[in-house]
Image (tube, rainbow, N blue to C red):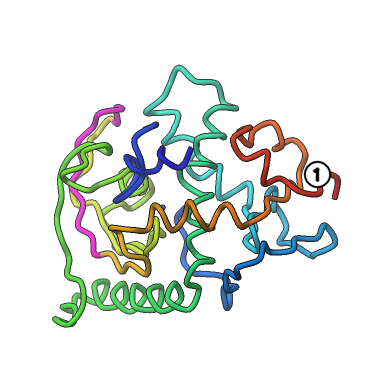
Amino acid sequence: MFALHRSLSPLLGACFLGILLTACEPQLPKLSEEPAQVTSTQNWPAGTVIVVGNEPILASEIEAWVDTVALVEPSLSRRNHLRKALTNLVLHKKVARQILPAECERARQQAMGALEDLRGGNELSGEGPQVTQVRGVWNDIEQDIGLDRWGAARRENPGEWQLLETLGGWTVMRAPSTPKKWMPNSDVTIDHVTFYYLDPATMKREIEGALEKLPILVIDQEWRDILPVFYDHLVTDETP
């Protein structure tokens, strides 16, 4: 199932086809060698439907991507749109956060600094990643756009710099050129700079391995059937 990610973002895999966030939650938890112990008595944020390890997943985080998934896969049902939004654009980012939480927070802070500079019309420091411009459709691997950046370009004020969590990193991006009418294969021009905390060359394997050590707790049982059976062996305490 993780292979779906390769075509969706810089390293989202090829079976299918990064939730617009402005912050990591305070001090992300370290991933230990032993599976995290998730309990149903913990006070998760309002709207939490699933917890992976110690990271809550809110219904709103999934819903934020449903319209983009529906655009590129119009023949699927809404349930399948939710499933693909969950597994392809949210779940693995939550797992990635728990591999190197300190580095994740550091990358987020760097991205926030870059966001402030770019919004202020300032150049980025020459010591770090620089802004790159790409143009293409979401699944153009050579252009390294990804469904998350492509989808973020569909939101309000796409020409303004915004912060986007992508797989294993944080992206600051804007879309100076977007289509008047969006189609599944629409080209878009995106300026972006990404601060990775996981090595893009190895993070797919790292995230797959980390996920196998993390229990999945379904808080809202309506989401139990949306979660693919592929993850059944990780589901714990289904009756919180």
Q: Is residue 88 above or below residue 161?
A: above
Rendered location of residue 240, percent (x, y): 85, 50
Residue 16: name its quadrant: top left
Badge 1 is on which residue? Answer: 238
Binning the other alpha carbons within 10 Å of mark 1 as few (below 14), some (14 to 19) or many (20 upward) gives: few
Q: Residue at x 71, y 61 (%)?
A: 45
Residue 38: name its quadrant: bottom right
Label 1's element?
Answer: loop
Task: Left or right? Give the position of 117 relative to 151.
Answer: left
Magenta span includes 226: no
Task: Left or right? Give the position of 179 relative to 170.
Answer: left
Rendered location of residue 205, percent (x, y): 41, 53
Rendered location of residue 105, percent (x, y): 46, 76
* Range covered by the magenta-colored residues: 182-193
**Residue lying at the far front of the rendered structure:** 33
Identity, as a three-letter code, of the amino acid under mark 1: Glu
Q: Residue at x 19, y 52 (%)?
A: 176
